[in-house]
Image (spheres, rainbow, N blue to C red):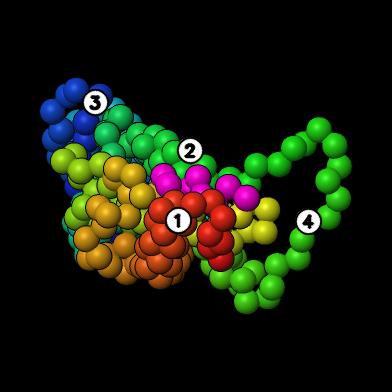
Amino acid sequence: MAEKTIELVIRRQANPESTPYDEKFVIPYRPNMNVIAALMEIQRNPVNAQGQKTTPVTWDMNCLEEVCGACSMVINGKARQSCSAIIDTLEQPIRLEPMATFPVMRDLQVDRSKMFDNLKRVKAWVPIDGTYDLGPGPRMPEKQRQTAYELSKCMTCGVCLEVCPNVNKNSDFMGAQPISQVRLFNLHPTGKMNKDERLHALMGDGGLAECGNSQNCVKACPKGIPLTTSIAAMNRSANFQLFKSFFGSDYQVN
């Protein structure tokens, strides 16, 4: 009886400047394998389907529990986490490609720096003075806390940017992820102190005005974060901010 196998076609690239190519691998099947397990099998024995010795495939991973977002890639045409992609649920040959939105470093490994640069741009943190004990922070209303909890699930995986038609090499659009994080930190009782700065960042180039409302992001988000709701909420806040800037600093925006 023939041994059951798994066929994978992997888009490979030796370095950022080299030409990408496809390489096929056939590995032994085991029940309940995920894509990461298949890649580890290739790493242990880097021999392609033609029986030729090749270089181990490079990819990113960390938690293996769909929490860190590092192992995002395109699997059979769909951007998702490879740790939660179960082999038994995938059509073979399984095609693995790096996310096209980000620069490829090698094979399936991409440089997601622009995501973190955009978080810096919108000041996605709560600034506090750590030189002395500030005491307990203000309590959040329960409804607001629940909203913030959902937004805090973001793992900076990049899937929402990968599926967005407005995030491309011809556009500066930052995507849904940093916009939603602005909503998260503007909800925070202490984070509100820098609310205006974050909103001004969203009102600049590559911000809210660049969104085409395709809604691909909310459909693809592996954590089910209400990204389109965040975009709508930030559009509303940006409009209020515009009036505030026009009428002067005495105009209060809630």
Q: CA distance from mark 1 to mark 2?
A: 28 Å
Pointer 1 or 2: first along the chain: 2
Q: Which mark is residue 16?
A: 3
Q: Within 10 angstroms of label 3, few (less than 14), some, or many (20 or more) residues?
A: some
In contact (CB < 8 Å): disc 3 and disc 4:
no
User: SS of the residue at dot 1?
Assistant: helix
Query: Which quarter of the image is occupied by the N terminus?
Result: bottom left
The numbered mark at residue 247 is 1
Q: Is 174 on the left or on the right of 52, as rendered?
A: right
**What's the distance in space between the residues labelled 3 and 4, CA to CA?**
46 Å
Q: Nearer the viewer, mark 1 or mark 2?
A: 1
Which element carries disc 3, helix, strand or loop?
Answer: loop
On the image, the x and y values in percent for residue 209 come to: 27, 54
| Residue wearing tag 4 | 137
Q: CA distance from mark 1 to mark 3?
A: 49 Å
Where is residue 108? Give x, y as percent. Answer: 30, 39
Question: Percent from the top left, x then y, of residue 104?
Answer: 27, 33
Quadrant position of residue 76: bottom left
| Amino acid type at mark 3 | Pro
| Residue at 78 percent of width and 56 percent of height | 137
Tag 2 residue: 120
Q: Which residues are magenta?
A: 193-201
Determine if the magenta segment contains residue 199. Answer: yes
Q: Is residue 82 among what the camera can see? A: no
